[in-house]
Amino acid sequence: MSLLDLASYASAWRGYEYYKAKKVTLFKKIDSNHFEGFVAGTNTKPYHVLIDLEHPRSSKCDCPHADGKRIICKHKVALYFQAFPKEAEQYYREVIEAEEEAEREQERLENALIEYVSKMKKADLQQALLQMLFEGPEWQYDRFIRDHLGEY
Ligand SMILES: [Zn+2]
């Protein structure tokens, strides 16, 4: 598994943001599998990061989140993107595509629901509405009464 695949969704995204915000300083390639650098954190002192592509879990960062642990933190991800800018752009495209796909899926579902409801029989609609009012959240019940029966 690559370093990026081992990072949590949040660490990958924050790492991308750090990379784009140019928080990686003193970047150095040691060999084709090892990269070293400093990544500015929220504190004044930048974190020292060392990534090992062959053994991503052995990568090091001295931030409180990852120090002494095998966690892939945002600083390691930021350094990884600094080493592989094309991977960063690929990662960004994939995130955007996934968001767009989720939106399209949401739209498909909405359209299917609209079509289904438009074909329901009146008695079934009344049944479904009452069930939602009695079993749904209280604000929905109160709002329906206010909007349709006036102030009680
Ligand atoms: Zn870190």
Image (cartoon, rainbow, N blue to C red):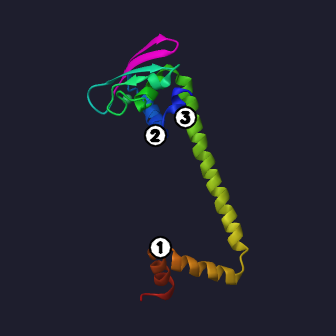
- Residue wearing tag 3: 92
Is 119 situated above or below 109? below
Q: Which amino acid, mark 1?
A: Pro
**Mark in the foreground, 3 or 1:** 1
- Residue wearing tag 1: 137
Helix, strand or loop at label 1? It is loop
Using the numbered discs, state the Cα–Cα distance from disc 3 to disc 1 in whole angstroms.
38 Å
Please state the extent of the stretch shown in magenta in the rendering: 26-40
Q: Position of residue 137 (x, y in %)?
A: 47, 73
Q: Which amino acid, mark 2?
A: Ala
Is 66 situated above or below 135? above
Q: Quadrant of residue 37?
A: top left
Circle 1: is it few (<14), some (14-19), or many (20+) Cα within 10 Å?
few
Q: Which amino acid, mark 3?
A: Tyr
- Tell me which label, 3 or 1, sits earlier in the chain: 3
* Residue 37 part of the magenta-drawn span: yes
Please name the residue shown 68% across and 84% down the image.
123
Q: Seen from this angle, which residue lies furthest top?
A: 31
Q: Is residue 21 visible?
A: no
Q: Is the magenta region chiefly helix, strand or loop? A: strand
Q: Position of residue 82 (x, y in %)?
A: 47, 22
Viewer-side residue, 53 vs 137: 53
- Residue wearing tag 2: 10
Viewer-side residue, 56 vs 24: 56
- Tell me which label, 2 or 1, sits earlier in the chain: 2
Count of labels in the image:
3
